[in-house]
Amino acid sequence: MTTATSKRKPADEGGAVFDRELDDLPQELRRREWMGRIEAVLFASVSPVSREDLARVVGQGASVEMLIDDIQAELSGRPYELVQTAGGWMFRTKTQFADAIKASADLGDQSLALTEMEMGVLCAVAYHQPIDRAGLKDIFGKEVSRDLLARLRYRDLIASGPRSPRPGAPHTFVTTETFLAMFGLQSLRDLPELAMAGPGST
Amino acid sequence: MTYQATAISDDPTKLPHLPRWVTSGHAETLETAAFRSGAALTVLEQLVSDPRYGVPMKLLANRLALSAATATSKLEGRLAREGDIRDAYHLTPPGEARGPDGDLLAFWRAAARIRTDGAGEIADLMGPDFADEVGIRLKEAQDRIRAHGPLAGCVFVLRAVLDVDDRAERSACLLSDVVLARALNWKVVLPVTAQRLTKTMLRDLDSNGQGADLAVQVRILESIEETIRMARDLACRAEALRTVKPKLRAKASDSAVDLFLTEDAVAPASMLSPRIRGTNTPMTDRAARRFCDRLVELDVARELTGRPTFRLYGISP
């Protein structure tokens, strides 16, 4: 079965058109091939892949969601999973293996970890967006350095949003889809409720 | 300098209005709610579909979109105020991120622009989770409407969408608006469902709580009544603006007036100059500011924000 499909592929790619429908395959094989394609696309991509992009590699009538459900079912025992985040789906290692990955990769100081202040600013932006530097100053009681904001922006965790209606028209900051993906949120509504983070829980 | 006061024709007898028996008292059963909604929808239908009444439809839709955004922001727990949402949308430079508040208003403005027969457009707005279901739900809602009236159809799709995802308030309200528009054969979707709903009501609806159907129907009915009031009000204000049009001597005043008749908030610096949005007519920054000041002077427009800078003007408060 697998050899048959792998033999087919180069022939397809040689042709001018990419065969989405796979009409010549029986039902079951066609599904397998579609699932394989979705998995391959997700595996090859660094960022989440949107539904429209995935729909382009499977047949017109096929439901991307159902194919992904099947893939997820097959992955149940694996150390990585297929998750839906902002803007699409992506492969992610399960959190329980975080320590193993850290131990093996020797990430050192240049890891993804954010400093306490960076984390604080990111939180403030997430909850109070759109917010400008003056607004952040009101929250932290001190100027938030442009360097720190530039670092967050360089990592694509925040982006510039609407202009703030103050003298000088400073731009405000808003969080990005990368921010949602990094923290495993589907939307901003998944942020923990502020009331819950009060003195009761800490 | 003083100007002759503008004679605003707000003859209340000319525009259709709600009979007293609809607005007085409270709908206490599903039957009375359905009955009253029939009367209210007839009046709204007349205002919306008869061009003689001069209701500025695009302006009405955009204004409703803003209130719907404020209401859904509450439903989603973000609690953004109307002014914040309007600012986020209008003060974002092209190409930058609008942020959640601006995106929400953009969603509702897009909703007010979809064609009711375009299932594809509706599905695009509702997102991938519901893309496959839209057609089926709309058909089922139609059966509901045939048996129990439009409001029952609205409640039905609200519940159907919330069943799939209880956080999809905006999609649920949008689909309900589509159902209402289709039931009345409107070409445009007016965002009325979200306006007065509360979180508790939607939670009750989702868990099939006692009397949840009636509570939601009554709120939608109230917001339809509110929309009638708004439509009448906007018709009068638009009429006033059209009356003063000959007095406006700015070169591009015709196109600028048209913009005021479609947008609920106009930022002179970005929407009137260097070119009036949607047209090729040029207008300088200064001319744009003077034009807006002149409208305020003539008492047909208002400054909406109360700020000395980044002002937004509109003909409705």
Image (cartoon, coloured by chain):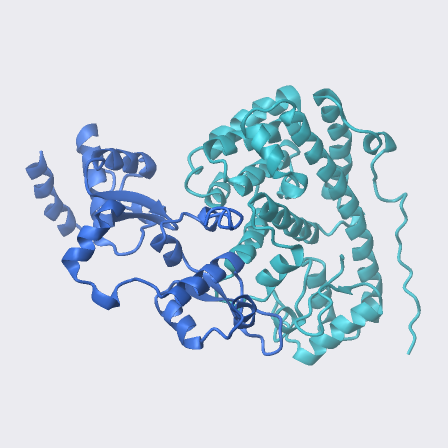
Chain colours: A blue, B cyan
Q: Is residue A69 above or below residue B277?
A: above
- Which quadrant does the N terminus of chain B fall into? bottom right
- Residue shown at 58% from the left, 69% from the top: A164
Determine the residue positioned at 13% across, 45% down.
Answer: A9
Is residue B35 visible from the viewing direction of this image?
yes
Residue B57 spot, x, y in % from top left = 70, 49
Q: Where is residue B237 in the image (x, y as percent from the top left)?
A: 81, 56
Q: Quarter of the image containing the C terminus of chain B?
A: bottom right
Residue B82 coordinates in the image, percent (x, y): 66, 55
- In depth, the one of B143 and B77 nearer the eye is B77
In the rendered view, tell whether residue B195 sits above or below residue A117: above
Q: Where is residue B38 in the image (x, y as percent from the top left)?
A: 74, 28
Give the residue drawn at x 80%, y 47%. B232
Residue at image location 30% in from the left, 55% down from the top: A47
Q: Residue B161 vs residue A32: left or right?
A: right
In the displayed structure image, the side of residue B298 where residue A112 appears, left or right = left
Please tell me how many numbered marks the rendered image carries. 0
Query: Can residue B251 be seen here?
Result: no
**Which residue is at the front of the view, A182 or B59?**
A182
Left or right side of A171 for B274: right
Q: Quarter-wise, where is residue B288 in the image?
A: bottom right
